Amino acid sequence: MRQKSLAILALILIATGIGWKIFDSAKNSEGDKKSANKMRPSSVVVDTVIPGDITVTLSAIGTVIPRNSVTVFPQVNGILSQVFFREGEFVRAGQLLAQIDPRTYEAALKQSKGNLERDQNLLKNAELDFKRYSQLLSQESISQQVFDTQKALVAQYSAAVHADQAQVDTAALQLEFSHITAPISGKIGLRQVDPGNLVQSSTALFSIAQISPTTVVFPIPQNQLGIFLKRPHSDSSKHNQATAQTMPIKIEAWDTDNKSVIDLGQLDSVDNIVDLSTGTIKLKAVFPNQSARLFANQFVNVHAILETRKNVLTMPTTAVQRGTAGIFVYKLTQDGTSVEVVPVKLGPVDAGKVLIESGLDAGDRIVVDGTDKLRNGAKVIVSEPSSKRGGTSSTREGPQSNLHDKSPSSEEHTRNKAANSESTTTKSTDTLANPKKQ
C-alpha cells in the first residue's frame, strides 16, 4: 500500500514538472516574439521640406447682410387685386409688382377734378366782373365798397382753385399708390398676402433684398484691429492719399465646410466700437456676388488675406506631432533607416501646409504617416508619397484640402499593417494553443 502511494505521488510530481516546462516554454516563446516585434522596423510614409508660398489669413465666421433690404407695405387701403411677379425672381426698381383695386381712387380723382373745373369757371367769371367794376369805378358809377367786395371775391375763388388743385394732386397720388412698384432692384421674397385680401398700410406684402453687390459682416479680436487699420479699405482709400498705393485687404467667402470659395471681395469698412461682451469689433466686406450664391443672413467662413510669404520652408501639417516637450516632427536620418525627434517652431497654416520658422532645413525628409509606434531612434522602412507637392505654387484649393487627401501608397501601407497585425495575432494564438509545434 505504501509503495502504491509513493508511485502515485511520483507520477503527480512528474506531470507537474512537465506542465511547468511546457508553460515556461510557451511564455519564453511569446516574450521572444514580442521582443522581435519591437525590433521590427516600422513602415512609414515620408515627405520633403521644400520652399513654397504661404498665404497668411485671418479666419472668422461672417453673416451676409444685403446692402439694401426693403419690406414693402401698401400706402393705401383696399383689395389686393393683382400680383405681377414670381416669388424669388429678380426685379428692377420701378417695376410694377402688385395692384390694389383702383376704382375708389379713380372716382375720387374725377370728383376732385370736377371741383377744380367748377371753381376755375367761377374765378374766371369773377375776374371778368372785377374788370368791369374797375372801369365803372373810374367813371364813379359804383361805390368803392362794391369794388372791394368784387376784388375779395376774386381772391376767394383763386384760393379755392389752389385748394382744388391740391385735392386733385392728392387723389392722383392715392391712385398712383394703388399701383405698387419695386423701390429698389434686387431679389424678391415670398409674398405674405394673396390676391383678394383686404390690405392696409400696416400689412407687409413682400420684401426685396439687394444681393449684387452684397456685404458680409464678421468680427475680429480687438488685438488684431491694428492689422486692418494699417491697410486701406473702400472708405479710407478715398481720404488717405498716403496709402493710396497700398492694395486693400482681400476677403474670401468660403462655404460652411471650408472646401470651396463662394466669392471674392475686399474690406469695405470698420465699425466704430468694440463689443465689451466679446472683445471683438465688426468689419464689413463687400462682394460683387455676380453668381448670386450669397444670400441674406447666410453664415459663411471669412478668410481675410493679410499677406503672402514667398519662398519659405513648408511641410505638410500631417507631419506635426505634439507632446509634453512641445511641437516636434520625426526626421529621417541620413542613412534612411531610422528617425530622430526634432523640435520645430511653426508659423501660419495654409491649404494643408505649415510654415517652418526653425528646426528644419530644405531637403529634410520628415514622417507624415505611420507615426503611431515611432520613438527617437526607431528603425523604419520608408515609403514615398504618391503625389509630390508643388514648390512655389500659390494656388489655394482649400484650407483643409491636403489634410483629407490620402495617397494610394499610404492606404496600401495601412492595409499592409492591418494584415501583418492580424497574421501576428493568429500565430501567437496558435503558439499558445499548440506549444509542441515550437
Image: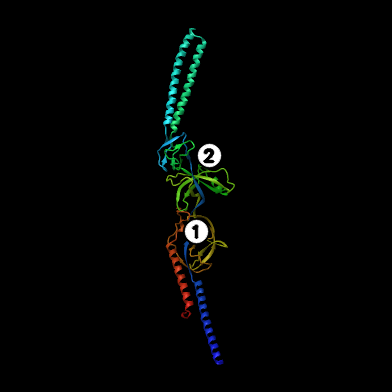
Choose between 29 and 303: the one closer to the eye: 29
Counting from the top left corner in percent of width and height, residue 416 is at 44, 68
Q: Is residue 380 above or below residue 107?
A: below
Counting from the top left corner in percent of width and height, residue 102 is at 42, 32
Residue under the image location 43 percent in, 25 percent down: 113
**Type of the residue with mark 1:** Thr
Q: Is residue 32 above or below residue 390?
A: below
Give SS at disc 2.
helix
Q: Is residue 6 above or below residue 264?
A: below
Counting from the top left corner in percent of width and height, residue 91 is at 42, 39
**Type of the residue with mark 2:** His
Residue at which label 2 appears: 239
Choose between 250 and 345: the one closer to the eye: 250
Residue 96 seen in this snapshot = no
Res 181 quadrant in image: top left
Q: Nearer the viewer, mark 2 or mark 1?
A: 1
Residue at which label 1 appears: 317
Q: CA distance from mark 2 to mark 1?
A: 42 Å
Res 183 quadrant in image: top left
Q: Which mark is residue 140?
A: none
Q: Is residue 284 above or below residue 14?
A: above
Counting from the top left corner in percent of width and height, residue 331 is at 51, 64
Choose between 183 and 128: the one closer to the eye: 128
- In the rendered view, how is the structure colored? rainbow
How many numbered tags mark residues here? Answer: 2
Q: Quadrant of the N terminus?
A: bottom right
Residue 331 seen in this snapshot = yes
- Please report contact status of discs 2 and 1: CB closer than 8 Å, yes or no: no
Choose between 38 and 49: the one closer to the eye: 38
